[in-house]
Amino acid sequence: MEPILWGCLIPSIYSAYTDATRRNLYDYVTIPIFLLGTAYSIYTGVWINHLLTALVVFVVFYFCALKGGFAGGDVKFCTALAVWFGYPSTLYFIGLASITAAIYGSCKLSKMGLFKQRIVVYFRGVYMKIAYGIKGAIPENKLPENDEICEEAIPFGPFMVFAAWLVYLTPMI
């Protein structure tokens, strides 16, 4: 059996479950995934690619979290997955996770009756920004500061796990 299965993908199933049910990605799962991935990438000699990829993912997701788009667990979990997958596979699973999450989120907003309203407001803001250069015209929905989770928020962890499994099972390159 390949180490990525036992060190990353199988433990990540538990993380997907906890994120979907409790909206929490626990450090006691994420940190061992990261440490095992780091050790394995050093052992196999691909540590420069994998650790640089993980660093870039951490920085990008950290700034997204500062803007209110992700929670800290998503940042750490995606970094842990990136240290196993390296470049370019990390781009594939992040892209695939983002697309599937956007489709799911659009369906969820549609079901709630909010999709049309959000799209109209968003594109009106884009128009105001492009046509008139108005700062702040594009609405930014942020996650709540407290532990409360809004009804429209979707957990990103299950989508990352789904995409990581898909990238592992169907190698792109």
Image: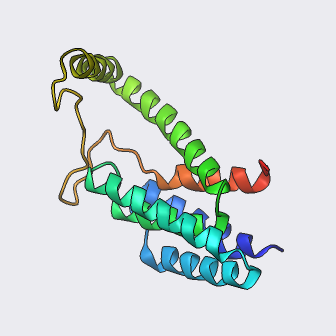
Please provide percent x and percent y for residue 57. 48, 60
| Residue that sits furthest to the right in the current view | 1
Please provide percent x and percent y for residue 91. 60, 50
Q: Is residue 160 left or right of residue 66?
A: right
Residue 22 visible somewhere in the drawing? no
User: Which residue is at 55% across, 68% downward?
Assistant: 52
Q: Is residue 85 left or right of residue 139?
A: right
Q: Is residue 142 left or right of residue 110?
A: left
Quadrant of the image occupied by residue 80: bottom right
Please provide percent x and percent y for residue 87. 64, 59
User: Which residue is at 21% across, 51% downward?
Assistant: 144
Q: Is residue 42 left or right of residue 63?
A: right
User: Which residue is at 18% across, 26% downward?
Assistant: 137
Q: Is residue 165 shown above or below 73? A: above
Q: Is residue 9 shown above or below 36? A: above
Q: How many marks?
A: 0
Please provide percent x and percent y for residue 117. 27, 19
Residue 45 visible somewhere in the drawing? yes
User: Which residue is at 43% across, 29% downward?
Assistant: 106
Quadrant of the image occupied by residue 38: bottom right
Colour convention: rainbow
Screen quadrant of the N terminus: bottom right
Quadrant of the image occupied by residue 47: bottom right
Q: Is residue 138 shown above or below 150? A: above
Front-lying residue, 1 or 21: 1
